[in-house]
Amino acid sequence: MATAAGAPPTRAQLVVRLKRAEGQLRAVQRMIAEGEECPDVLTQLAAVTAALDQVGLHLISERLRSCRASGAEGCEQEFEEAMTTFLRYTRLAR
């Protein structure tokens, strides 16, 4: 999900990715309503899940990078909060 220059995606790019995932999810709903084959539906569901995971992991990593880059007092607390969020997120993603 990084940009061509290797930079992390911007918030606007993340929103575009979420809108694309939203469209994929609508397609999954349509596929189920139309009785599409299970493997095809599961392939699309996996794509939606991967897109959402990428956005979530980017947001968490952005928070960790920001904390590290700031070097401000209390960064340890923010880092621990971000790690707690990350661990919760990874458990939810399973």
Image (cartoon, grey):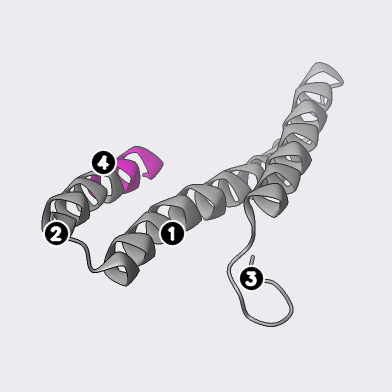
Figure label count: 4
Decide which of tag 1 and tag 3 comes sooner along the chain. Answer: 3
- Secondary structure at badge 3 equals loop
Which amino acid lies under the numbered mark 2 shown in the image of this protein?
A: Glu
The answer to whether residue 67 is left or right of residue 81 is right
Residue for badge 3: 2
- Secondary structure at badge 1 equals helix
Q: Residue at x 73, y 33 (%)?
A: 22
Residue for badge 2: 73
The reply to whether the C-beta atoms of the residues labelled 4 and 3 are less than 8 Å apart is no
Decide which of tag 4 and tag 2 comes sooner along the chain. Answer: 2
- Toward the right, the furthest residue is 34
The answer to whether residue 80 is left or right of residue 66 is left
Pair 2/3: label in front: 2
Against 90, residue 71 (above or below) is: below
Q: Residue at x 58, y 51 (%)?
A: 50
Query: Which residues fall within the magenta stretch?
Result: 87-94
Residue 81's disc is none
Pair 4/1: label in front: 1
- Toward the top, the furthest residue is 33
Against 92, residue 75 (above or below) is: below
Which amino acid lies under the numbered mark 4 shown in the image of this protein?
A: Arg
Q: CA distance from mark 4 to mark 1?
A: 16 Å
Helix, strand or loop for the magenta stretch, by majority:
helix
Q: CA distance from mark 1 to mark 3?
A: 12 Å
Which part of the image, by quadrant, shows the N terminus? bottom right
Q: Is residue 90 magenta?
A: yes
